């Protein structure tokens, strides 16, 4: 198993092999994400019981929570890809990091927007300077910073390494930002609503959420692979195998 | 005699030439400090501009918000800190670019000494020459914003500690964007999210001082941030400079 993983890891460094193997993985991601998202949406929107306090408005949770999950884990994945690039000089890691950044930014944006929409009926305001909201907003700016840096720098190798370094610096800083924002919030006003306290949910409420979270991760895999494959073709446009591939089509 | 012969023979075998009179790292560090001091003292515009920027931003607030003490005094800690933070950020923009343009940055990378301490020398001199004047100017602007007297000392102390962290973290962004001709907005976008903890603890200390609460906890946390930045960011700056110069 370990050897198999090691071989897989080394082979994934080859753009051609990456392109070929991911074409086999792609249908699995597509199928599982469609299945899980469909199941989660139908169960969550139609069958889950109404919340006794929030009514139907709590159902936006089925989009909000998975998006917030991804917003945070995509940044971690980006930093891991950055370490792989800087330590093992694997260029495919940068292709993946490049594919991840906009998706992470969009997920952060979705979680902020759905949070605002959810906030209106429950808190009576679109925006609150709550610690969680604020650190999410900062995370959004961190994503934009990485994307802007990649946009500005050239050649590509320099941009790749600079973005990798920035993502790693960001990961070291995220806990500091998180704790300082928590501290700042407690200083300024007492917490009126705690998002961290999990209400006891019946299975009919949290099972759809579980499906949605898994579905979002499968969707992430799907979209990362699509973007990474397109980027591989763009970067390897001059190599023989890409020319042959495009000649067929 | 025998030993000299042995040396001569060994000279042909040794793969790396013996470094004659190679100065110690401490010596090189001091030399780098001296060089930076001379260079930065001579760029008078770069030293004065951040101070003018700081003062101008602070002046905007009475004009834009309200000139009355009732409104200005409560927001003074935040205004002073945000203006100082932006001034530090602006002053960092030209930290590495002149060295890249005249080729001395490449010499720093190939000289065989660790890059992290040498880039730290650069940032430290910059902190002394650019940030300490900001710290000295701050109380004057504080008076103009009706900052209570008991907060003036904390203002200077928090800016002293905070600006060290700001300089060190900002230098990472400056190093990453060194290769670009003009990088003001990009560097701001990259660095500002990392500045938020420093801002929170800096203004926290001042709010506590205004309200007559103990400030030691906030200042200790600021010092912790500054020390963590002192320990970690030279390595990131060195890596960023390598990427900017040689793409490695």
Image (cartoon, rainbow, N blue to C red):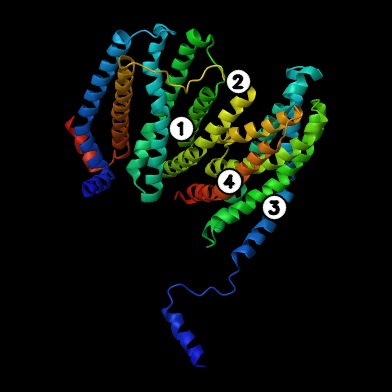
Q: Name the quadrant containing residue A96.
A: top left
Tag in front: 2 or 4: 2
In the displayed structure image, the side of residue A172 where residue B143 appears, left or right = right
**Circle 3 residues within 10 Å: few <14, some 14–19, many ≥20:** few
Mark 4, residue position: B228
Which is nearer the N-term, disc 3 or disc 4?
3
In the displayed structure image, the side of residue B125 where residue A231 appears, left or right = left
Mark 2, residue position: A190
Mark 1, residue position: A147
SS of the residue under disc 1: helix
Q: Position of residue A226 (x, y in %)?
A: 29, 29
Q: Position of residue B215 (x, y in %)?
A: 71, 35
Tag in front: 2 or 1: 2
Report the Cα–Cα distance between label 3 and label 2.
Answer: 50 Å
Tag in front: 3 or 4: 4
**Circle 4 residues within 10 Å: few <14, some 14–19, many ≥20:** few
Q: Position of residue A204 (x, y in %)?
A: 30, 14
Q: Position of residue B133 (x, y in %)?
A: 76, 42
Report the Cα–Cα distance between label 2 and label 4.
Answer: 30 Å
């Amino acid at each position: 198993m370990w050897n198999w993983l090691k071989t897989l890891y080394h082979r994934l460094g080859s753009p051609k092999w990456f392109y070929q193997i991911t074409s086999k993985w792609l249908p699995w991601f597509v199928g599982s994400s469609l299945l899980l998202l469909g199941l989660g949406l139908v169960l969550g929107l139609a069958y889950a019981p109404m919340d006794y306090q929030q009514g139907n408005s709590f159902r936006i949770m089925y989009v909000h929570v998975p998006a917030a999950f991804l917003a945070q884990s995509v940044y971690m994945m980006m930093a891991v890809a950055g370490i792989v690039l800087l330590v093992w000089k694997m260029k495919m890691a940068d292709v993946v990091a490049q594919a991840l950044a906009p998706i992470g930014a969009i997920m952060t944006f979705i979680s902020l927007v759905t949070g605002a929409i959810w906030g209106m009926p429950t808190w009576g305001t679109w925006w609150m300077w709550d610690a969680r909201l604020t650190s999410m907003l900062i995370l959004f700016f961190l994503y934009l910073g990485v994307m802007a840096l990649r946009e500005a720098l050239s050649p590509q190798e320099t941009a790749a390494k600079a973005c990798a370094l920035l993502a790693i610096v960001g990961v070291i800083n995220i806990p500091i930002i998180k704790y300082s924002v928590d501290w700042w919030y407690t200083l300024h006003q007492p917490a009126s609503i705690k998002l961290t306290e999990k209400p006891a949910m019946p299975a009919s409420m949290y099972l759809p959420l579980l499906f949605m979270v898994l579905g979002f991760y499968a969707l992430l895999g799907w979209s990362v692979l699509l973007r990474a494959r397109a980027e591989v073709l763009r970067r390897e446009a001059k190599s023989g195998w890409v020319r042959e591939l495009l000649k067929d089509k | 005699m025998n030993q000299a012969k042995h040396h001569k023979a060994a000279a042909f075998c040794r793969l790396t030439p013996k470094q004659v009179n190679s100065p110690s790292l401490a010596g090189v560090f001091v030399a780098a400090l001296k060089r930076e001091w001379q260079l930065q003292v001579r760029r008078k515009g770069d030293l004065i501009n951040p101070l003018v920027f700081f003062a101008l931003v602070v002046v905007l607030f009475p004009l834009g918000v309200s000139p009355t003490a009732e409104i200005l005094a409560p927001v003074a800690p935040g205004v002073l800190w945000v203006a100082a933070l932006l001034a530090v950020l602006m002053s960092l923009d030209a930290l590495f670019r002149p060295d890249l343009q005249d080729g001395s940055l490449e010499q720093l990378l190939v000289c065989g000494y660790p890059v992290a301490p040498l880039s730290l020398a650069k940032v430290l001199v910059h902190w002394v020459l650019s940030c300490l004047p900001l710290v000295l100017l701050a109380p004057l602007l504080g008076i103009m914003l009706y900052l209570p007297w008991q907060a003036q000392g904390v203002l200077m102390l928090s800016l002293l500690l905070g600006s060290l962290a700001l300089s060190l973290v900002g230098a990472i962004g400056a190093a990453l964007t060194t290769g670009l001709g003009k990088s003001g907005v990009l560097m701001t976008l990259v660095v500002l999210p990392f500045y938020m903890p420093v801002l929170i603890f800096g203004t926290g200390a001042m709010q506590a001082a205004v309200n007559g609460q103990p400030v030691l906890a906030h200042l200790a946390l600021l010092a912790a941030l500054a020390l963590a930045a002192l320990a970690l960011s030279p390595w990131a700056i060195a890596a960023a400079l390598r990427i900017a110069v040689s793409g490695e």
